[in-house]
Image: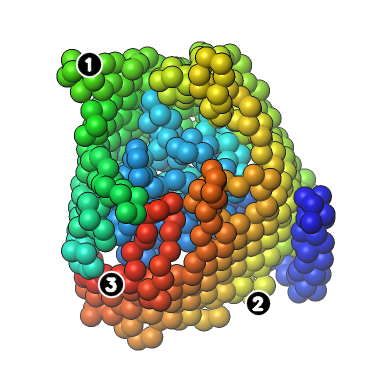
């Protein structure tokens, strides 16, 4: 089947379904406007808005979903809850960096290696290593998180570089109720895996504070696969007036990991990484206007036993203001500036004298506007434009447009066209033999349509999306007469379908399912052709039982000859018991079928794993 026929086939599935659910919703003649507070988002427009009113496709992963997983690392939870999102793993804990690393993020087949095409934000501030341009997956822990908003598709108009394939905005916790609140978790399990977490908050007279500390360690399921991490986080806030507040947050993480090496080979190098982050935000909230001025700084130091050493930083300012000019209209105007770079060297080169590969920085600034207009209380039109200026390659225009149509209070149709881009990294521009300072940004255009539907008195919610993404100018390393060189030569064309559903027949039972299918002209590592995840939770008296299954079909672990494809099914379960409102105990079983499978080429994943622990709430 060629790609045009495939796209028509997907439409033939979607359009009848859209018609059916629309008719069903109309027959109900529901006159109550639905507002689900859990679905209020900020990532899609930079101002609080109901998810149904944003043309972009946004998945919201709630605090309840994150905390009920009992995971310490955040990204594996998102990979289960967000259709089309896949994150590579290499063991029971820890992603690592450099050779043998995991933590690669793919969203709709776009992500890059390393992860430079999906942008991670922390409270709206960009997070990526200044030299290599990618986030550090080990630095994001679940205990700090209030919720996560994931834009599936380009969002460069609002967020600039790296938001080419999508955006993961991690929104951290803050103490909202007066008084003290404390939580702690102790976990122990297979391969001497230990996880300790404590967090707490305090609020009084407009002042609030939240802090957390995490420690994870494991011997790993293979020789030389041990991993250790310590992570601390602090958030402070103060309400100056009822319209103005200021908050600051800080984090510091240090982790050590060893590359166990490909199956049958020797272990690789050991890494020692420290990552820090700080931000200061001044926020305003009025009846017809709201906005923010944010200063952010993140930095790190990486040391590998092969002699590689780097220090990097990424800092800047984010400014935006949204104004309701008249009924149904919102105009957002913003300005971003960031500067990123650092020094990379090998301290063992030149007989121990050391060699500096690069010591430089790149800056970017941009202005943008985003307009939303509601018409007839049913149709919402959105349009935006960004002009990015990079100190290396110059200007990059970034338009976007879309609509959301609500024929009834329980049905929403969406359509959008958006451009995404990624600036070349310091590594690609200046470091090592393939470097090329004449590189231009990678670009893509994404087209999508979708429908959101609520049925059975809102007990059942469904979402279906079809997309087509075309990319060009991808940075590839090619052989020229003078040797290897980075050039803008790659292209891609991805077509896919995504489904997500939630069903809550009673207060005690809930079911979640999501599925994604993607057709790629050229296979991409860390992108499965099909993903299916189904999870069911049942509460009975003081017991809580969760059972989930994840199926991955045709995951490419290697694309250079010979190609390697992995398909597998994982069955996981969790049982918890609440002694009282202060203490509960849990037991988790992962890969209960003890399946042998691979996510990274020649790196076998662990078999059956058990983890148990205690949660404390005060």
Query: Along the polypeptide, which appears first: circle 3 or circle 2?
Result: 2
Image quarter of residue 360: top left
Q: Dot 2 corresponds to which residue?
A: 456
Disc number placed over residue 610 in the picture, else none = 3
Secondary structure of residue under mark 1 = loop
The location of residue 419, given as percent across then percent down, is 66, 34
Q: Dot 1 corresponds to which residue?
A: 350
The residue positioned 17% from the left and 19% from the top of the image is: 352
Secondary structure of residue under mark 2 = loop
The residue positioned 66% from the left and 48% from the top of the image is: 520
Cα gap from disc 2 to disc 1, whole angstroms: 71 Å
Q: Residues within 10 Å of mark 3 (few under 14, many from 20)?
A: some
Secondary structure of residue under mark 3 = strand
Disc number placed over residue 550 in the picture, else none = none
Query: Along the polypeptide, which appears first: circle 1 or circle 3?
Result: 1
The location of residue 108, given as percent across then percent down, is 60, 49
Cα gap from disc 3 to disc 2, whole angstroms: 37 Å
User: Which corner quadrant holds the N terminus?
Assistant: bottom right
The residue positioned 71% from the left and 58% from the top of the image is: 451
Q: Residues within 10 Å of mark 1 (few under 14, many from 20)?
A: few
Query: Along the polypeptide, which appears first: circle 2 or circle 1?
Result: 1
Eyeballing the image, is 4 above or below 501?
A: above
Q: Nearer the viewer, mark 1 or mark 3?
A: 1
The residue positioned 33% from the left and 72% from the top of the image is: 608
Q: Is 133 situated left or right of 575 in this image?
A: right
The location of residue 183, given as percent across then percent down, is 23, 61
């Amino acid at each position: 089947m060629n790609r045009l026929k495939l796209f028509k086939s997907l439409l033939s599935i979607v359009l009848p379904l859209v018609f059916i659910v629309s008719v069903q919703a109309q027959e109900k003649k529901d006159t109550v406007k639905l507002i689900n507070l859990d679905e209020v988002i900020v990532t899609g427009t930079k101002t609080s808005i109901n998810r149904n009113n944003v043309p972009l496709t946004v998945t919201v992963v709630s605090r309840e979903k994150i905390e009920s997983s009992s995971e310490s690392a955040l990204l594996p939870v998102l990979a289960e809850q967000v259709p089309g999102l896949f994150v590579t793993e290499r063991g029971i804990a820890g992603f690592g960096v450099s050779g043998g690393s995991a933590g690669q993020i793919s969203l709709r087949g776009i992500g890059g290696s390393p992860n430079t095409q999906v942008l991670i934000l922390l409270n709206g501030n960009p997070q990526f290593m200044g030299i290599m341009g990618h986030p550090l997956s080990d630095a994001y822990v679940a205990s700090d998180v209030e919720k996560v908003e994931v834009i599936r598709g380009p969002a460069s108009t609002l967020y600039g570089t790296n938001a080419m394939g999508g955006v993961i905005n991690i929104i951290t916790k803050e103490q909202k109720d007066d008084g003290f609140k404390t939580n702690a978790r102790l976990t122990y399990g297979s391969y001497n895996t230990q996880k300790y977490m404590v967090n707490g908050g305090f609020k009084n007279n407009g002042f609030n504070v939240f802090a957390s500390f995490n420690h994870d360690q494991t011997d790993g399921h293979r020789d030389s696969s041990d991993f250790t991490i310590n992570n601390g986080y602090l958030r402070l806030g103060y309400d100056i007036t009822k319209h103005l507040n200021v908050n600051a947050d800080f984090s510091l993480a240090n982790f050590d990991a060893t590359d166990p090496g490909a199956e049958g080979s020797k272990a690789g190098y050991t890494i020692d990484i420290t990552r820090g982050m700080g931000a200061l935000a001044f926020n305003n909230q009025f009846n017809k206007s709201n906005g923010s001025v944010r200063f952010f700084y993140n930095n790190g130091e990486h040391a590998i036993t092969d002699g590689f050493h780097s220090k990097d930083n990424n800092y800047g300012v984010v400014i935006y203001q949204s104004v309701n000019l008249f009924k149904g209209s919102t105009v957002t105007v913003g300005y971003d500036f960031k500067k990123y770079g650092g020094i990379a060297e090998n301290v063992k080169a030149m007989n121990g004298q050391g060699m500096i590969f690069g010591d430089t920085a790149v800056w970017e600034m941009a202005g943008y506007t985003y307009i939303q207009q509601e018409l007839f209380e049913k149709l919402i039109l959105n349009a935006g434009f960004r002009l990015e200026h990079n100190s290396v390659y110059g200007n990059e225009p970034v338009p976007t447009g879309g609509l959301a149509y609500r024929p009834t209070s329980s049905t929403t149709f969406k359509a959008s066209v958006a451009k995404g881009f990624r600036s070349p990294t310091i590594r690609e521009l200046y470091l090592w033999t393939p470097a090329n300072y004449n590189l231009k940004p990678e670009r893509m255009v994404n087209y999508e349509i979708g429908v959101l539907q609520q049925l059975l008195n809102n007990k059942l919610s469904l979402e279906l999306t079809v997309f087509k993404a075309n990319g060009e100018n991808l940075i590839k390393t090619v052989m020229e007469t003078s040797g290897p060189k980075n050039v803008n030569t790659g292209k891609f064309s991805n077509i896919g379908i995504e489904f997500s559903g939630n069903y809550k027949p009673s207060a005690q039972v809930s079911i979640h399912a999501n599925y994604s299918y993607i057709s790629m002209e050229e296979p991409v590592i860390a992108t499965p052709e099909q993903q299916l995840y189904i999870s069911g939770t049942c509460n009975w008296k003081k017991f809580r039982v969760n059972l989930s299954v994840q199926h991955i079909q045709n995951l490419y672990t290697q694309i250079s000859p010979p190609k390697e494809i992995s398909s597998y099914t994982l069955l996981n379960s969790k049982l918890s018991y609440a002694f009282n409102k202060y203490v509960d105990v849990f037991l988790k079983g992962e890969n209960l079928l003890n399946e042998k499978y691979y996510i990274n080429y020649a790196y076998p994943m662990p078999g059956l794993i058990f983890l148990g622990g205690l949660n404390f709430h005060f």
